[in-house]
Image (cartoon, helix red, strand yellow):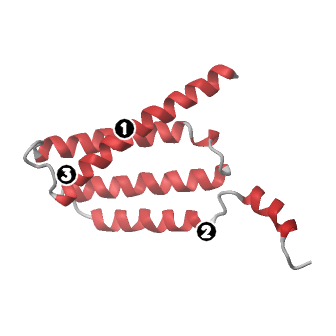
Amino acid sequence: MDNRKQMLEIFKRIAGVAFALSFLMAIVLFADVGRQYISLITAKYTFISAGAVALLFNLLSFESGKHNPVFSFVYWVGSLIVFTGLVFFIMRWPFGVYILTGGLVILGGSLLLSPNRKEMDKSSDDLLDS
């Protein structure tokens, strides 16, 4: 079991680095910062590949998080749809805005699920109403 925890920790670190790289490329693509250092095509494909790696590794390790699994699953499915919408938007394929909007709605809906439901149930005894 210890090897599984180590593997999940490695997955999370890889996902974190890939997410950071993808975020930097999103800044290059959407804010026009750093275009003198990196070409638009390179930024597009780095964003897509690093984002896909980050989402894949986060989805592989989502059950090991501190939040309840339903919240994590809905959150990451929404994130995957948002990423797909961003890819459609960047590549100028049709329906990118609709996919992006749908993913953002799912992400917003996932925030209605309590990520720390167990902690909220335990802390309800500490209310000052009594």
- Tell me the residue that label 1 is attached to: 18
- Tell me the residue that label 3 is attached to: 28
Question: Is residue 69 found left or right of 85 in the rendered image?
Answer: right
Residue at figure coordinates x 77%, y 56% from the top left: 118
Query: Tag 2: Cα neighbours inside 10 Å, few (<14), some, or many (≥20)?
Result: few
N-terminal label among 3 and 1: 1
Q: Which numbered tag is attached to residue 112?
A: 2
Question: Is residue 18 found left or right of 37 in the rendered image?
Answer: right
Residue at figure coordinates x 28%, y 62% from the top left: 96
| Image marks 2 and 1: residues in contact by CB distance under 8 Å | no
Q: What is the secondary structure assignment of the residue under circle 2?
A: helix
x, y percent for residue 107? 49, 62
Q: Amino acid at mark 3?
A: Val
Distance Cα–Cα, label 2 vs label 1: 27 Å
Q: Amino acid at mark 1?
A: Ala
In this rendered view, identify the residue nearer to me: 81 or 62: 62
Query: Tag 3: Cα neighbours inside 10 Å, few (<14), some, or many (≥20)?
Result: many
Tell me if residue 53 comes above or below residue 125 in the rendering.
above
Distance Cα–Cα, label 3 vs label 2: 32 Å
Residue at figure coordinates x 85%, y 67% from the top left: 126
Q: Which numbered tag is attached to residue 8?
A: none
| Number of numbered callouts drawn | 3
Q: What is the secondary structure assignment of the residue under circle 3?
A: helix
x, y percent for residue 10? 51, 28
Camera-near label (3 vs 2) is: 3
Place residue 122 in its image quadrant.
Answer: bottom right
Q: Amino acid at mark 2?
A: Leu
Distance Cα–Cα, label 3 vs label 1: 15 Å
Tell me if residue 99 comes above or below residue 13 in the rendering.
below
Q: What is the secondary structure assignment of the residue under circle 1?
A: helix
N-terminal label among 2 and 1: 1
x, y percent for residue 127? 84, 72
